[in-house]
Amino acid sequence: MEISPEVGAKLLSVKKPIKLAILWHLHQPNYQEPNSDKMVMPWVRLHATKDYLDMPLLATRYEKIKTTFNLVPSLLDQLDLYLNGGTDPHLELSRLNPENISESQKIAILETFFSANPTTMIEPYPRYKDIYRKSKNGKNKILPALFSSQEIRDLQVWSNLCWIDPVFHNEEPVKKLLYKERHFTEEDKYNLLEWQIKIIGKIEKTFRDLYQLGKIDISFTPYYHPILPLLCNTDIAKEAMPNITLPDQKFIHPEDARTQIEMSIAKFEKMFGSKLVGMWPSEGSISEEVAELLLDSGIKWIATDEEILFNSLKKGEQPINRNSLQRVYEYGSGLKLFFRDHVLSDKIGFVYSGWDADRAVNDFIENIKRVRSNNIDNLDNAVLSVILDGENCWEYFPSDGQDFLDALYSKLNDDDEIETVTMTEASQICQPEKLKSIFAGSWINHNFKIWIGHQEDNLAWDLLKSTRDKLVEFQNQNTDYDKSKLEKAWHQIYIAEGSDWCWWYGDEHRGDHNSEFDQIFRKHLIAVYKLLNLDIPSELLSPINQSESTYETQYPDSFITPSIDGAITHFYEWAGAGIFDTKKVGSSMHRVDRYANAIYFGFDKMNFYIRLDFIDKKELGYLKEPKLKISFYTDGSNEHNIELYLNKLGVENDDFNFAFDEIIELAVKRSFILENGRGEFSFNMILTDGDNKLEKMPSTKPIKVVLPGLNQELFWPL
């Protein structure tokens, strides 16, 4: 029987794998104080032992696994700083002998040494957990007298020890300290802190060796992680947001964008001894002008988000189909572009941490195989791009994500239908599709709203512009001025052009360190004036961030008694309620795939009320077994839970009444939460699909509430 060429080709394609390109992005803001060897925050050092060495080591355990690591040059500089004696407040406090510390130093330790995810980084360790829970006995007040010198020393050790990836748990002194668990000595602590620096010293060499052996691929981001399109011209923000309010002063400096790119290229060549070919532009931010700059600089490929692709195809009047995403594209005279699948990328970043590792990996691979089936006719050119933060998400996984990553790499290594490739390989072996236009935007909602448009963002841009203009003016008028000082001043400008400052301005992200980021940004601009011996403008001495510390939470200001019908019966039924805006929760990561929009809460004399609004209720229709678990936490270990099965639309019993239509509304008897119906408690919610955790609300700390007694006056009349 003769087989036609078409049938023969299909039979061959059945055996072909789909190409999977995984890129892990490693980045921290520039925490270095201007003209100092001190970091303002410890996260570079702590992530070094948790993520920066184990990630490439894990990825190269398996023969067939190929991955791409994107590194930010300013992160590498900060690692070098620690190798040359750099320090940070956490490290300085860790070095103190508790026998000789002041009360203020003791308070600083108790306030800052629990900065870790309690579920995965504190609770698994009994001694750390005990000290943590003891610190909560004073509620919002630190009581240093309750803690012995030994407890403080144990806390110093555990605050560093919990940031070590399990890959290193059998190394000394880590193994000894984990076994010992408590009653640490000054020598124990000293050995641990010395070990941290040794690990930092291995990171650059490990990346270089693995890259030169062909085990991994390396791409870079522009030097100080700037939003390149906005450096070129802030007006570009109007392409995605025509009605945006822009800063008073236009920022049009493509020369700065070029400098940030070329500095990064030079850093790569010095570190790896070869030409840089790939870039993840900061936050996946791209425009046609930036694409031309990258081409001129010799960059061969870049990556961004799928929404940029779909908007670019629409802009260029090109067809869109279900397989458009799994292609390599080419713009202009040879720049290749990859577009991340943000559903699969976000599953790793935000969803799988709540799943069993094997179950999560099976789900991930099943999704890839569905994509493969859709591309069965063109597997030679099909590539699926998974791109995400390679450090922050692991704090939410058990064992720092090691179980998940081991299972993932193991199954991918043994699966003949999936072939992992580097971005560089895929750019060379896949026939690209032509991309006529590029829509200007970032990986977050295909726009630049995170970094421009809010009054805080705009003020930051204006201050950056005026400082840069002053530097140019001074340089032109003082041609004999100290060249080294001018060079340092320009580097302060380039640092201030980084994306991380405006990430924390505006109303999108609020966290515990907003004021610190504000101060660091202004310090870099102030440093320019100091280097030029000029007076510092008064506006640089005032905070840009004017928001209150309670950021995402507005608390109730009157009693409410809403109708529990799953609908907004009338405008005023939730007037006076507290509001938690889930979009404004502080995080170093940004999630595209969210369900919850806002949480409303309040109470009357009998009940506590919760309302949950969704971004798009239709998304819940795709879930098989949607369930909402509400947990109420009181003093000690008391916890009361309510589980709502959302496919039942509504339930009423002796303790609570709930309804679900357009929104979820829930009334819970005060006595169910607190025995006397009054006092303090906190609550959070988890949305699941069967046993699969989808979203925790809030994603950080539970919302605190005070239920007053009948004789207490909580709401004062105006």
Image (cartoon, rainbow, N blue to C red):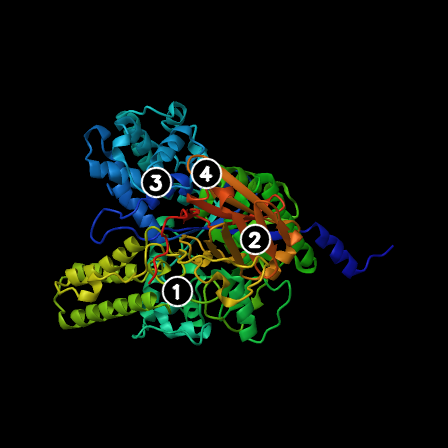
Mark 2–mark 4 distance (CA, rounded to whole Å): 23 Å
Instruction: Point out the tag, 4 or 1, that comes first from the N-terminus.
Output: 4
**Mark count:** 4
Indicate the position of residue 244 as horizontal and vertical percent values: 41, 73
Mark 1–mark 2 distance (CA, rounded to whole Å): 31 Å
Instruction: Point out the tag, 2 or 3, that comes first from the N-terminus.
Output: 3
Left or right side of 341 for 136 = left
Instruction: Point out the tag, 3 or 4, that comes first from the N-terminus.
Output: 4
Left or right side of 437 for 647 = right
Kind of residue sitting beneath label 3: Lys
Q: Which mark is residue 139?
A: 3
Q: Which residue is mark 4?
A: 120
> In the image, what residue occupies the spot 66% across and 45% down?
416
At mark 4, the secondary structure is: helix
- Answer yes or no: do the residues labelled 3 and 4 have beta carbons within 8 Å? no
> In the image, what residue occupies the spot 45% across and 74% down?
239
Q: Which residue is mark 1?
A: 297
Kind of residue sitting beneath label 1: Ser
Q: Which residue is mark 2?
A: 344
Mark 3–mark 4 distance (CA, rounded to whole Å): 22 Å
Indicate the position of residue 31 as horizontal and vertical percent values: 29, 51
Left or right side of 715 for 304 = right
Mark 1–mark 3 distance (CA, rounded to whole Å): 55 Å
Q: Residues within 10 Å of mark 1 (few under 14, many from 20)?
A: some
Q: Residues within 10 Å of mark 4 (few under 14, many from 20)?
A: some
Indicate the position of residue 243 as horizontal and vertical percent values: 43, 76
Question: Which image quadrant is residue 412 in?
Answer: top right
Q: Nearer the viewer, residue 334 or 392?
A: 392
Kind of residue sitting beneath label 2: Leu
- Answer yes or no: do the residues labelled 1 and 2 have beta carbons within 8 Å? no
Q: Nearer the viewer, residue 694 or 626?
A: 626
| Front position among marks 1 and 3 | 3
